Amino acid sequence: MDLEAQLLAFSLLGVEWVLWLLVLLSVLCVIVAVERFTYFTLNKSPKNALQTSLTTYLKGGSTEEFQSSLDEMGGIEARVLAAGLDASSNGADSAEEVIAGTMVFERSKADRGLIIVGTIGSNAPFIGLFGTVLGIITAFNDLASQADEATDAVMSGISEALVATAIGLLVAIPAVVLYNYLQRRVKSTFANTTSLSHLVLARLKSKEA
């Protein structure tokens, strides 16, 4: 069997398997979305408590008390600041390095799963289009083999093929929205963490001076 015949045999498998693939990708998006929302909910530092503790520390509060309150709060911002304070006994420069390293570690955990959502969002329309092409090939093959019922065969085949494109878009649009939201959530969290870290480092360096 030559290559053209093999490709034709593959194309005649139909659209159904492409539709199931798109359904599987949509389920995967939902799983990632639930996992990410749960992660951000459980790893969000309480804003008011963090602001109050930081203000007290910047006004001359105890480093030990501030670190203890951060340990109780939990969350990304609190963990990064607590790691810096824990290393501050070796100097402000050491604290700065530890904060930077902790932020990289926390960022890698926050970004987990985003590549899956982004890949699905950018490629689902092409998968749907691929299904449409397969469906049209099948429709014209039916047209060639069933000349007496040509119109019905082509119309039903093309309508089935177009469903694949529609479902591809239906999967891609929410995935892109979800990806953009998660990206913004990550950027916002770490921009806030960076800002708070600079304030804490400024206090540590002023104490050394």
Image: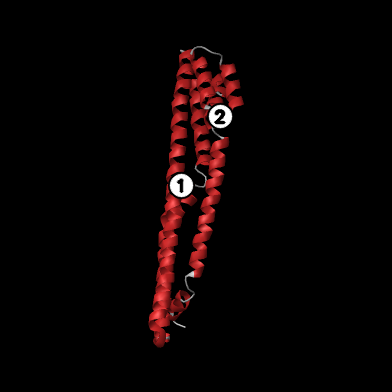
Mark 2 or mark 1, whichever is nearer to me:
1
- Mark 2 belongs to which amino acid? Arg
92 shown above or below 36? above
Instruction: Tell me the tag on residue 92.
Output: none
Q: Spatial distance from mark 2 to mark 1, Cα to Cα?
A: 26 Å
Instruction: Tell me the tag on residue 79.
Output: 2
Circle 2 packing at 10 Å, graded few (<14), some (14-19), many (20+), is many
Which label's residue is closer to the chain start, 2 or 1?
Answer: 2
Of residues 164 and 129, which is closer to you in this image? 164
| Residue 86, x across and y down, in percent | 57, 23
Circle count: 2
Instruction: Tell me the tag on residue 178.
Output: 1
Q: Residue at x 41, y 80 (%)?
A: 152
| Residue 64, x across and y down, in percent | 59, 17
Q: Residue at x 53, y 48 (%)?
A: 32
Q: In screen coordinates, is 38 left or right of 127?
A: right
| Residue 189, x across and y down, in percent | 47, 33
- Mark 1 belongs to which amino acid? Leu
Element under disc 2? helix
Element under disc 1? helix
36 shown above or below 22? above
Image quarter where the C terminus lies is: top left
Q: Residue at x 51, y 40 (%)?
A: 110
Of residues 59 and 197, which is closer to you in this image? 59
| Residue 148, x across and y down, in percent | 40, 88
